[in-house]
Amino acid sequence: MGADGAVVAVLAGKFAEIRQHMDERTWRLYLGSEARAYAGWAGCPAAAAAAVVAGAAGVSRATVAAGAGELAEGAGPMPGRSRRPGAGRPRAEDAQPGLREALGRLLESATRGDPVAAVKWTTLSLRELEREMAGLGFRCRKDAVARMLHEDGYSLQGMSRTAEGRQHPDRDAQFRRVNAAVAGFTAAGDPVVSVDAKKKEQLGPYYRPGRSWRPAGDPVRVRDHDFPDAELGKVTPYGIYDVAANTGFVSVGTSRDTAAFAVSALRLWWLAEGASRYPGARRLLVTCDAGGSNGCTGRLWKDELAGLAAETGLEVTVAHFPPGTSKWNRIEHRLFCHITRSWKARPLMTREDAVAGIAATTTYQGLKCTAVLDGAAYPGNVKVSDQRMRYLEDRVIERGGFHGEWNYAVLPAPRPAPAPEPEPDRPGRVPSAALNHPALTGIPAAGLTALAAALDVPFEARLQQRNYILRGGPRVSAARSGRVHGNRRLSLTDHLIALGLRRHLRLPGRAIGALLGIDQSTANQAVTLAARLLTDARLTLPSAPPPESTPRTPGELLAHAAANGIPLTIPENRYPMPEHFRTRQARPPATHPKPPTK
């Protein structure tokens, strides 16, 4: 008996509406129920009814027959299941004993990750694992391998740039210090800027990541290789991000990324925006990385900042981020990321294109950016002398108590010069502090200091002139000439002490040389030079009256010193003290016999 087309159409409509609400087992039982009902209504065999229902539902007749058979057998409900227990193809590891253990041994040699963490990964691909398992005699497709990897805690992952290398133990403390400084400056209305140099950008038709809307089939044509073009060159953007105003300022340099270029960008920002935005500011906080052109160890960076502070009258406070934490610099995620977005899928053909792209950078949060072109030349490898750094450290740079290499201030006006440290006394001589006593020199201590200050310039000038004449030319350093000078020259104070010993105690040159650790001739020259300096400067040596009896032997000299509370000892050197002092005595008047009168 043929099926009526209208009946098949009605059944097909019913099946299309109800199918999406049934799982596999319910759908099968429903079709079996319809086939049994159609067989009783049409009076046809069960096989013919199953064929009619299968054609209307778009399934096989075996599925309909299986559902009718389950109903005839009195199938009961199975909550939460679509198939009978044990149905379906067994898993690969269940059908092949030892497969999972073999896969674990294969993964052991290629597993990466923290053994304590729950997530691991392998360097082998799924198809490589499938081939390796086939070589071991197991049939295991890549889908089964992926399922077992997930069950064992593996996952498919990319790389994440989160590792920062070795972390400084005071990293968190420095971050808190930087945040506190930013909050303090901002609350006081003083400017706070975050500075850094963006990576160099090649000018010309070069590829840049990103996509832009263009007519279909008309992409921007760029070079297929990124070989540098010496004629077009590169540009280096150096950015200054004003934290409080949420504005950016970028100096696009065409030369090298040096400390001079970095400080020049700061100077341009202050002249263009900072001075008008903060008219009453007397200090500036600069937060930056610990490396690069604004690194914490750079000498030129500090020297250029000293010049900026002197020009603007600002006390420039610098707070460096700890090494390896440059991504925490605010300018990276407040300014540079938006500049990169403005440049995406857009080749920088000229310097003006780079400047215009930066100036067009804005955000919905109100960020505005200014860009200028800096075409000045900044030579590399500029050295700052040790003498200049000593001056900066002594008078301009003020180091913080916590990691002074990261936290310091550059003063606009130098501090007063520190008092010069006294030169160490030469071994084998009596210290100047012991000889500088009125009982030995007849000169008050304060008077000797005043005389030394007054005669310092003519003393140095006379020595330089004398040495020039003796050398027959300008001075050559010991390192260049290969000569090493064993003895340091006498100081001006020693010259005045030698003159005082001669005039007050009438000591001979040999005795003075023994006390000062010098030769007799050198002692006599020191006495003569000191007297000449005083005469040329029209100064008088303040001297007390000499003692009633001047010492004539070393023992008498020591006794005289002990009587006046002077801890004097005669040093052992190559200039021995004479046993007897030959003091100059007044000559008796000459008596000549009168010639006989004629």
Image (tube, helix red, strand yellow):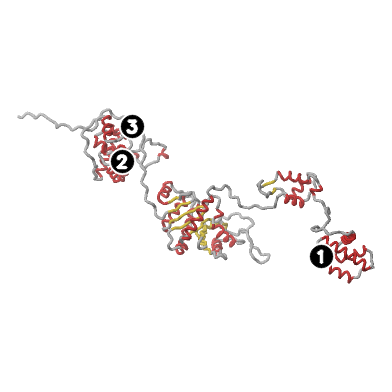
The three-letter code of the residue at mark 2 reads Thr
Task: Give the label, 2 or 1, closer to the camera.
Answer: 1
Q: Which residue is mark 2?
A: 493
Q: Quadrant location of the N terminus?
A: bottom right
Rendered location of residue 495, percent (x, y): 29, 39
Rounded to the nearest angstrom, the CA distance separating label 2 from label 1 is: 113 Å
The residue where tag 1 is placed is: 19
Query: What amino acid is at disc 1?
Result: Arg
Residue 381 is at least partly visible in this image: no
Residue 77: image location, x then y, percent: 83, 59
Label 3 sits on residue: 571
Task: Name the foreground residue: 286 vs 12.
Answer: 12
Identify which amino acid the numbered label 3 is placed on.
Answer: Pro
Relative to 425, 276 lies left or right: right
Q: Nearer the viewer, mark 3 or mark 1?
A: 1
Residue 407: where, in percent of width, then height?
47, 51
Q: Is residue 493 above or below residue 65?
A: above
